[in-house]
Amino acid sequence: MLVTMSGVRLSYGRWPALDKIDMEIRQGEFLVISGASGAGKTTLLRLIWMGDRPDSGFVEVSGFRSDRIRNREFPQLRRKIGIVFQDFRLLHTRTVFDNVALPLQVTGTGNRIVQKRVISLLARMGLSHRRNAFPHELSGGEQQRVAIARAMVAHPVILLADEPTGNLDPEVSREVVDLLLEINRGGTTVVMATHDPRQVPAGKGRFLFLDRGVLRGADRWTELDPDS
Amino acid sequence: MDRTGSGFMSLVRSAVKEISLNLHSRPGARLITLLMVALAFIVFNTFLIISWNLQGIVDKEEDLVGMEVFLQRDISQAEGRTIGDNISSMQGVKSVYFVSSQEAEALFRAELPGRTDLLDVMGNDFRLPASLQITFETEAMSQGRISELSRQIEAVAGVEDAVYGEDYLPGLLKTVTTIRRLVVLLGIVLVSSISLVVFYTVRLSVVRRSLTVDIMRTVGAPWWFIRIPFVVEGLFMGVTGSAGGLVLVAILSKVLSSAVAQRFMPLSWMTLVILLCAVTGTVGALAGSYEKER
Ligand SMILES: Nc1ncnc2c1ncn2[C@@H]1O[C@H](COP(=O)(O)OP(=O)(O)O)[C@@H](O)[C@H]1O
Ligand SMILES: [Mg+2]
């Protein structure tokens, strides 16, 4: 199992942001976590990359357990994880190339390999011509694709996407979801958090629903929206 | 994956690149630090200059403001010199000079050539008293010590009277002591504020880049890799800020040097201030980089 959560509870202040979370994520699946704003989606993803640790219970990701992990192991864990955010979080003083190259540079990958990998990845994502542009010169869709390239460049085993389409219009959103599905077909496990699960076609993934910090099981979104 | 062999060197190369990227951004914060530090130095140095100038005046006055010890009339020249030796062994006495009766008369005639009639009026038997001219060590130049010394000296057999510039010396000494204390106090306050300015500017400039820290963290950069650019920046800002501030003050005091007697603060103090700012800059950078972490 790639990710296991067991009896997880995490509170910010008085109320738990997440409670009684038991779940598993299998290698290679496409998991959609939906729920209203404030339901705890971002917190759940943070627990996976161990930006936070649970108050009780544990999270295990690719052999690293939240209650046993050592400080120097965090970088090792995070190199196995790619993360994409709603607001892209590109470094605005660096070019597209440098943004994408970052995960390789922080692990001491040789310059030649960095060049080769970044250039071929940008080509595959249709961003070659934007290689030397700065983030603010790009459209939202392009920025998100750069962010996805950065998340994928070091070949993570799991890609976490937190509302990746939140700042994009519907057509571009569809392209981004398609890109995530394609990445998943390539073998990478994808976890996508979204308030609008209809963005992912019903047969293409497993759907979990978060309701004020508690997981409510699969396909709940269909009940919420009888039209779809 | 190229993780073996050249891996670490590549990582170090990347770190160096990060450091230089960092140093090339945000000249504004560095300028603010520099100006704040310079301002603090200017205030501090102004007081230093005042204190040094006053000290100079005191040094001159100290030589003038000695004590004049008049000896009893029946004291012979040999006895007078013995008394002088006694007094010169007292603590705080710097020098004793014996002025014989004849010398006193010669001096009187030399200094007041128009009033030699006064001596003539006194008759042929009149002798000016022999005296001892005494100067004091700087440490003894306080009101309490000098009046104590004068009591001690007056108690010596053969001494008639001890006279010193009681009126203005103590006031002057008090002023200098007060200003010296003020300089020390001001130094402490300013050095702490300089440190705080460096600390907070560096910390702020690091916190403003918390996105970089976040991203570095999420892509799995080792902690030293994330922080080293900030630490170098803090160190650099502390050193350039304080050194630049010192240079500004030096230029300013050069410009003003025609107006007042000038002395710059000692090299050891400058070194100390620069070192201190280097440390606070580094600590500020570390504090800033930990700001958002839990
Ligand atoms: N850093 C934080 N400090 C305090 N409360 C937080 C923090 N992060 C999230 N929360 C709270 O936890 C709950 C879940 O937040 P979040 O995981 O961001 O929800 P979602 O991503 O589903 O919108 C919310 O009530 C939110 O206010
Ligand atoms: Mg969220």
Image (cartoon, rainbow, N blue to C red):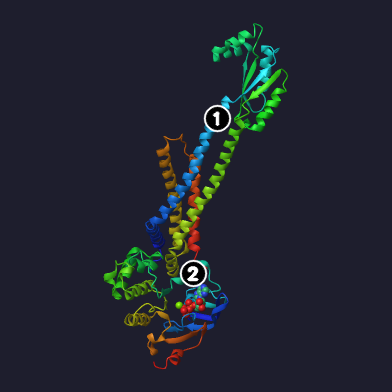
**What percent of the width, then of the height, locates residue B113?**
54, 12
- Eyeballing the image, is A75 above or below A24? above
**What percent of the width, then of the height, locates residue A33?**
45, 83
- Eyeballing the image, is B165 above or below A81? above
Q: Are marks 1 and 2 on the same chain?
A: no
Give the label, 1 or 2, closer to the camera: 1
- Alpha carbons under labels 1 and 2: distance apart: 66 Å
Residue kind at label 1, given as amino acid type: Asp
**Going 51% across and 45% down the picture, which residue do you hit?**
B272
Q: On the picture, is A58 further left or further right than B207?
A: right
Residue at image mark 1 = B59
Q: Does residue A63 appear anywhere in the picture?
A: no
Circle 2 marks a residue in which chain? A
Residue kind at label 2, given as amino acid type: Phe
- Eyeballing the image, is B5 above or below A31? above
Q: Quadrant of residue B216?
A: bottom left
For mark 2, does the 10 Å Cα neighbourhood hold few (<14), some (14 to 19), or many (20 or more) residues? many
User: Observer-nearest residue: A202 or A121?
Assistant: A202
User: Are the residues tagged 1 and 2 within 8 Å (C-beta)?
Assistant: no
Circle 1 marks a residue in which chain? B
Q: On the picture, is A228 further left or further right than B93?
A: left
Q: Quadrant of residue A175?
A: bottom left
User: Observer-nearest residue: B84 or A21?
Assistant: B84
**What percent of the width, then of the height, locates residue B54?**
53, 34
Residue at image mark 2 = A74
Q: Residue furthest left?
A: A129
Q: Quadrant of residue A97?
A: bottom left
Specify whether tag 2 is near ligand 1 (CB below 8 Å).
Answer: no
